[in-house]
Amino acid sequence: MRRIHVGNALSAFGLGFTVPYLYVYVAQVRGLGAMTAGLVLAVFAVAALIVLPLAGRAIVRRGPLPVLLATLVTAAVGALSLGLAGSAPTVLGAAALLGAGQAVMQPALATMIVDCSAAETRSRAFATQFFLQNLGLGVGGLIGGHLVDTARVSSFTLLFAIEAAMFLLLAVVMSTVRTPHAPRIADAPAVSAKGGWRQLLENRAMVQLSVLGFVLFFACYGQFESGLSAYGVEAAGISTSALGTALAANTLMIVVVQFAVLKFVERRRRSRVIAGVGLIWAVAWAVAGYAGLGHGSQEMATAAFVSTYALFGLGEAMLSPTVAPLVADLAPTGMAGQYNSAFALVKQLALAVGPAVGGPLGASLPTPYIATFLLFSLGISVLAIRLGKGLTTAQDHPWLAARSRVVARGGAASESVSA
């Protein structure tokens, strides 16, 4: 598990080097224009949507480690090619490789975490993963910002080379991991892939969680760098530097509170925790509304906008030990890879639709934008409560279930001694 967490940090560190500067690199440094830069971002999403339905079955059949190693090499080739590409076709091809590799890393690593953890330790494992991912992204972005120079293409080539090296280093680290044996469907016929998806769709709780997950990612992550930032600049008059401060506040909140929040979350019902996140995000959208629609000073508007991102970070810290472990606990034996990939696909769909809807709405219709996503956040709470009604105690409240098992064993032991 420690090696898996180190690998997560390395991959996030590598991504942090390039993700914030990808648009500038393609549009300005390579001189390929805003249209090509936008297509590159679209290619990332399309590549993910293509490979994720296939990734789940591959993880189930082959195990997460071989799939992860293959995708890491693919992502490394894509990153290095992107740093060397000088034309639109080569840039788009490299982006497709990098996007496909990045997309499959998530469910493969999540499945390895499931294989290396028990129900009682899974929340802490996923919380640690989320903490290290944000820390790696933040540190990587900070260092990358000091290395890049828009006047020198070579500085960006260096960034992409470092990203590729991080992926290859992660492959080396992961190749030494020996996960506990988990059941696999090794000899399933080809048609069983459809059966796996049919089985997933017949799992009512998983379908409900997928719908809830779509709303979660659409109403939060899908707005960070599109609708919410457009709203902040256009309606609230937030400067680009203040926008950077808001993003930093989001990461800082996660890094600071993650393990304190974990202690609070671990002993509570997962559905109620997610419902609480919906309420917190509703407050965040209300604060954002004050920033753009209120009558305070510009300083107050900026403070409110930064607070919005910080509140989103608090909600994210509550979700990280809650949603991913719930996906794993809903999966039948040996099907964690399929379920993780399906949920990652839902996330990618939300991240593709969110900016397309939120960007224009946040820039041109600020009041409807805030009202819409405030209602979406309240909808998260409603969906979470409904989901909780269909979950078992072990799925919704694993801490209580584990405690009940311990008490039951203790009672049995006591009766045995008495006898």
Image: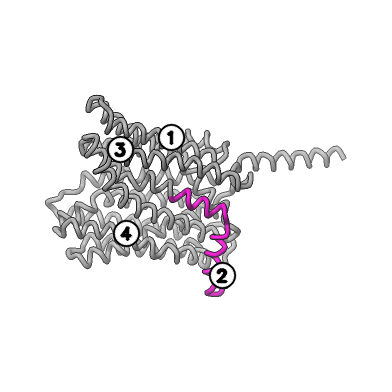
Badge number at residue 280: 1
Q: Residue tagged by mark 3?
A: 367
Amino acid type, callout 2 = Ala
Q: Nearer the viewer, residue 308 or 174?
A: 308
Which mark is in front, 1 or 2?
1
User: Residue drawn at (47%, 36%), measured in percent from left and top?
Assistant: 259
Residue 106 position within the rendered picture, expressed as x and y whole percent measured from the top left: 43, 55
Which mark is in front, 4 or 1?
1
Badge number at residue 186: 2
* First of labels 3, 4 by sequence position: 4
Q: Nearer the viewer, residue 250 or 201?
A: 201
**Image label count:** 4
Res. 226 visible in picture: no
Say if mark 1 contacts mark 2, CB within 8 Å: no
Q: In whole angstroms, how far apart are the C-alphas of marks 1 and 3?
A: 19 Å
Say if mark 2 contacts mark 4, CB within 8 Å: no
Q: In whole angstroms, how far apart are the C-alphas of marks 1 and 2?
A: 44 Å
Asked whether residue 42 is drawn in magenta, I would say: no
User: Residue drawn at (51%, 58%), measured in percent from left and top?
Assistant: 339
* Left or right for 155, reference 198: left
Res. 413 visible in picture: yes
Badge number at residue 44: 4
Which mark is in front, 3 or 4?
3
